[in-house]
Amino acid sequence: MDLIREAPLGQLLRLLSGNKPFQYPEEKDGFELPAQYSIYLQASNHASNKAAYASSEKESEHDKIASPEAAEAMEPDYQRELEGLGMTKTKSRQYTTPYSIERARTEEQLELEKTQTIPIIPQKTSDGIILVDWYTTDDAANPHNWSGSRRGFMTFLICAYTWVVYTGSSIYAPSEQGVIDAFGVSPTSAVLPLSLYVLAYGVGPLLWAPLCEIPAIGRNPVYIFTFVIFFALSFPIAVVNNFAGLLALRFFQGFFGSPALANGGATFSDMYSLLYVPYQLSW
């Protein structure tokens, strides 16, 4: 079910039907927040109410909070509640420096923790924002916890995608003489379709890579949208009857084929810990 939902067909069906088929757990009726999130929301609401009371100048003396100490006394010990539920904070990659010894040690600990069902307590910023995380260390929705075969298949897809895009640049080379004969251009000009393709897949990540990092968008929509256009452009390129059109089409094909080149490594990091990412990149 998860594979169908995340595939282009599943995403298209969800888009056309208003997310009715292949729903995520949070979209289903009767979904309840895990205990650690409920407690944090209570803490957040309590802190908001406390701030509202403290800042209001229209409250009666009876309703005002007399002092910060009194406000603290009113606030429950949420950390104690979490401990009462057997929950402790787990380390997070977000608070370590990439490619550092600290990150490597954190990755080692997380590799051990994901073999157990440990609730993950969400982090809370200084301004009260709750950072959403996975529910447990062995959460099946976390790509780090996918089966080896599933991650291997996804790795194969990214590698194949990258191979197709790179091949699309050099596969043009044998046809240069045909372009010279068909359009009457010089050998130097005949190299332009190759050069523009390479230029475009260098420029494309400036747009597509940041889009993939926006949580509301993610990687799949960018991969799917751009690859469909990349594939579709192959047909007009084969039948275009003027040199200017060929140049434009080759540029746009390289542009829309670029996400895999820039984001492939990031996708591997989504599925594998820092300890194993180098093995995937070596492919």
Image (cartoon, rainbow, N blue to C red):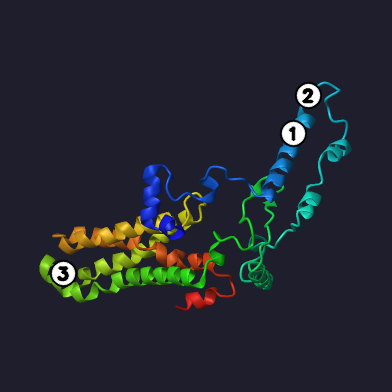
Foreground pick, 280 / 151: 151
Quarter residue 109 falls in: bottom right
Residue 118: numbered disc: none
- Residues at marks 3 and 1, CA–CA distance in whole angstroms: 72 Å
Q: Amino acid at mark 2?
A: Glu
- Secondary structure at badge 1 equals helix
Residue under label 3: 179
Name the quarter where the C terminus is drawn. Answer: bottom left
Contact (Cβ within 8 Å) of mark 3 with mark 1: no
Q: Residues within 10 Å of mark 3 (few under 14, many from 20)?
A: many
Q: Earlier in the sequence, mark 1 or mark 2?
A: 1
Q: Amino acid at mark 3?
A: Val
Foreground pick, 148 / 242: 148
113 displayed left or right of 151: right
- Secondary structure at badge 3 equals helix
121 displayed left or right of 220: right
Q: Provide residue 206's location: percent of width, then percent of height.
A: 44, 58
Front tag of 2 and 3: 2
Q: Earlier in the sequence, mark 3 or mark 1?
A: 1
Q: Is residue 209 above or below residue 274?
A: above
Quarter residue 70 falls in: top right
Q: Residues within 10 Å of mark 2 (few under 14, many from 20)?
A: few
Name the quarter where the N terminus is drawn. Answer: bottom left
Residue 49: numbered disc: 1
Residue under label 2: 57
